[in-house]
């Protein structure tokens, strides 16, 4: 029996938590990404887990390039980020190279072994997958790298 993929967090909950001033607490794991809708042209807010690496924000897409937020930033790479107590504009780079995505997964697994291990297990991988397993899995995923403007 195949497990259902993990659902993304409900953005309304995180928007409310940020509005209540709890950004420094919830922002340790989740940020708010605002993209421009590729069809509507309207702002679209998505709550996502992230990693900050060398001043850039890395976002993983478990749906690969099919995720709406990912397609929006490919169409218009200018985005806004709200993380912890900061809010800033940035430019996104879409990345689908399995080796780079696997590097991101390895980093996440190292920083959050229980959380990311559980996510990987829900996708049929072992809790401590080999590099080859990660690269094979990463072929279905995508990441976005946001650099502040």
Image (cartoon, rainbow, N blue to C red):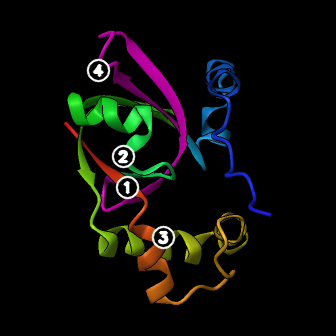
The answer to whether the residue labelled 3 contacts the one labelled 1, judged by CB atoms less than 8 Å apart, is no
The answer to whether the residue labelled 2 contacts the one labelled 1, judged by CB atoms less than 8 Å apart, is yes
**In terms of secondary structure, where does tag 1 sit?**
strand
Spatial CA span between label 4 and label 3: 28 Å
In the image: residue 84, left or right of residue 39: right
Spatial CA span between label 2 and label 1: 6 Å
The mark that comes first in sequence, 4 or 3, is 4
Q: Which residues are magenta?
A: 31-56
Residue placed furthest toward the front: 1
Spatial CA span between label 4 and label 1: 18 Å
Q: Which mark is residue 65?
A: 2
Occupied quadrant, residue 22: top right
| Residue at image point 70% right, 71% down | 121
Q: Which mark is residue 69?
A: none
Spatial CA span between label 2 and label 3: 16 Å
| Residue at image point 53% right, 90% down | 130
Pick the quarter of the image with the C terminus: top left
Q: Position of residue 129 (x, y in %)?
A: 58, 85
Residue linked to disc 3? 105
Q: Which mark is residue 142?
A: 1
The mark that comes first in sequence, 4 or 1, is 4
């Amino acid at each position: 029996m195949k497990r259902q993929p993990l659902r993304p967090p409900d953005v309304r909950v995180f928007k409310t938590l940020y509005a209540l001033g709890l950004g420094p607490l919830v922002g340790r794991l989740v940020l708010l990404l605002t993209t421009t809708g590729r069809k509507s042209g309207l702002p679209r807010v998505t709550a996502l887990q992230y990693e900050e690496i060398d001043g850039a924000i890395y976002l993983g897409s478990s749906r690969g390039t099919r995720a709406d937020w990912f397609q929006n930033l490919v169409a218009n790479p200018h985005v806004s980020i709200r993380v912890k107590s900061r809010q800033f504009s940035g430019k996104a780079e879409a990345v689908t190279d399995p080796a780079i995505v696997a590097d991101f997964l390895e980093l996440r697994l190292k920083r959050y072994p229980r959380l990311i291990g559980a996510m990987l297990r829900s996708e049929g991988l072992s809790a401590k997958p080999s590099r080859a397993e990660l690269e094979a899995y990463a072929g279905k995923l995508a990441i976005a790298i946001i650099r502040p403007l």
